[in-house]
């Protein structure tokens, strides 16, 4: 019977029982690490058959050091911690989990939108300081009939579109990879990014972090937005140029922001975003519920086991890239 070494590079979970249950009976040595740096990952994973990864960097140097790794499985949708090109060139499967938190993230984005629009955080803080006066929230506008712009139109924003429509919002989306048929199915109108920024009352970010999307919401985009627009981000912090956002807030170019993610996490004490009453911040929690966490852990471990057993994983990020790398070598 084959034996394998599986290393988890880092984790925030209180228990790894779900992963251990998936691996049970398959002769797997499961090594738990808490790597922060590239060198720590190299040392922990150099002889691993498989890697589970949360936040630790899986760089080209790390991948070059891997002697027999067959799969890197990340906890989450985004794979920006992993050098996909380097992994693909070595034939290493990269896996994620794309469907574990659709409800949670779409709910959180909608909650942030409503909290920003109704100025819940501002009013809560004010009342707790014994200021019982609605006028401090002026102006608040009716939500029904306003426009929600979605940057990205994958699984999560599709679900958000359904929920937003029940509130009477008209929904628009910018996604160069989305089909008109898909948008029509959800009663969503596809537009370019400039148009979306110009017409939307709420702009909700749902794109993956790539070279193309990093900093895509920057000075020019904020200049195009309505002065009473709110920006919501539950995707990746670096999609928004944070300096440009701060400038927009300082110059009252937008009405406010609600962010579950920022450029540098965790939040640093001197981050200017903490000083704005019209900015809501939550600690990268949109993905979380007890149910979604259990699903994420089970599916991430199953991705690893599928590859080790010689099966195609359900969530195979770089299948095409591996095929292209093999083709280039032949």
Image (cartoon, rainbow, N blue to C red):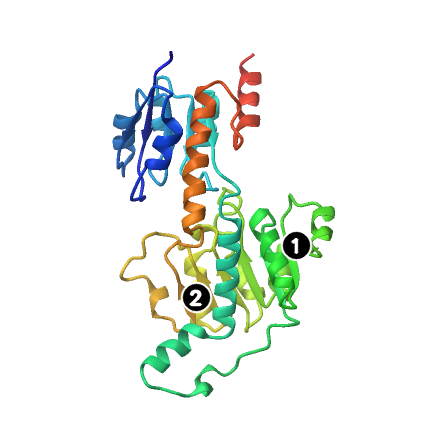
Q: Are marks 1 and 2 in contact (CB under 8 Å)?
A: no
- The residue nearer to you, when weighing 199 against 31, is 31
- Judged from the image, the secondary structure of the residue bearing numbered disc 2 is helix
Q: Quadrant of the N terminus?
A: top left
Q: Which mark is residue 268?
A: none
45 over 272 or under it: above or below: above
Q: Position of residue 221 (x, y in %)?
A: 55, 60
Q: Position of residue 180 (x, y in %)?
A: 73, 48
The residue indicated by pointer 2 is 247
* Mark 1 or mark 2, earlier in chain: 1
Could you say which quadrant of the image residue 280 lies in? bottom left
Q: Residue at x 71, y 57 (%)?
A: 187
Q: Quadrant of the C terminus?
A: top right
The residue indicated by pointer 1 is 192
Q: Residue at x 63, y 70 (%)?
A: 146
Res 282 seen here: yes
Q: Position of residue 299 (x, y in %)?
A: 46, 35
Q: Position of residue 243 (x, y in %)?
A: 41, 60
- Assess disc 2: are there few (<14), some (14-19) or many (≥20) residues with their C-alpha within 10 Å of its C-alpha: some
267 over 33 or under it: above or below: below
Res 75 seen here: no
Q: Residue at x 56, y 61 (%)?
A: 203
């Amino acid at each position: 019977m084959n034996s394998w070494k599986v290393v988890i590079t880092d984790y925030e979970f209180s228990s790894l029982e779900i992963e251990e249950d998936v691996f049970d009976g398959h002769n797997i040595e499961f090594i738990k690490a808490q790597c922060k740096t590239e060198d720590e990952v190299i040392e922990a994973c150099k002889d691993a058959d498989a890697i589970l990864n949360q936040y630790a960097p899986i760089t080209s140097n790390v991948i070059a050091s891997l002697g027999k790794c067959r799969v890197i499985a990340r906890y989450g949708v985004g794979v920006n911690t992993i050098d996909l090109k380097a992994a693909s060139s070595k034939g290493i499967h990269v896996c994620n989990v794309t469907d574990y938190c659709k409800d949670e993230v779409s709910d959180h984005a909608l909650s942030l939108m409503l909290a920003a629009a109704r100025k819940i955080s501002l009013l809560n803080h004010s009342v707790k300081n014994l200021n019982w006066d609605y006028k401090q929230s002026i102006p608040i506008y009716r939500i029904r009939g306003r426009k929600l712009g979605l940057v990205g139109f994958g699984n999560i924003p599709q679900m958000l579109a359904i929920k937003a429509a029940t509130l009477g919002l008209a929904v628009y989306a910018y996604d160069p990879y989305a089909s008109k048929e898909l948008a029509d199915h959800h009663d969503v109108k596809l537009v370019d990014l400039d148009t979306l920024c110009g017409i939307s009352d709420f702009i909700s970010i749902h794109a993956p972090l790539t070279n193309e999307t990093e900093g895509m919401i920057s000075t020019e985009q904020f200049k195009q937005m309505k002065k009473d627009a709110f920006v919501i981000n539950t995707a990746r912090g670096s999609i928004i140029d944070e300096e440009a956002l701060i400038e927009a807030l300082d110059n009252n170019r937008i009405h406010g922001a609600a962010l579950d993610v920022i450029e540098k996490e965790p939040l640093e004490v001197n981050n200017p975003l903490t000083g704005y009453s019209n900015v809501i911040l939550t600690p990268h929690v949109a993905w979380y519920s007890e149910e979604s966490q259990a699903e994420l852990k089970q599916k991430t471990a199953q991705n690893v086991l599928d590859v080790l057993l010689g099966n195609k994983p359900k969530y195979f990020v770089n299948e095409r890239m591996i095929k292209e790398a093999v083709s280039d070598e032949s």
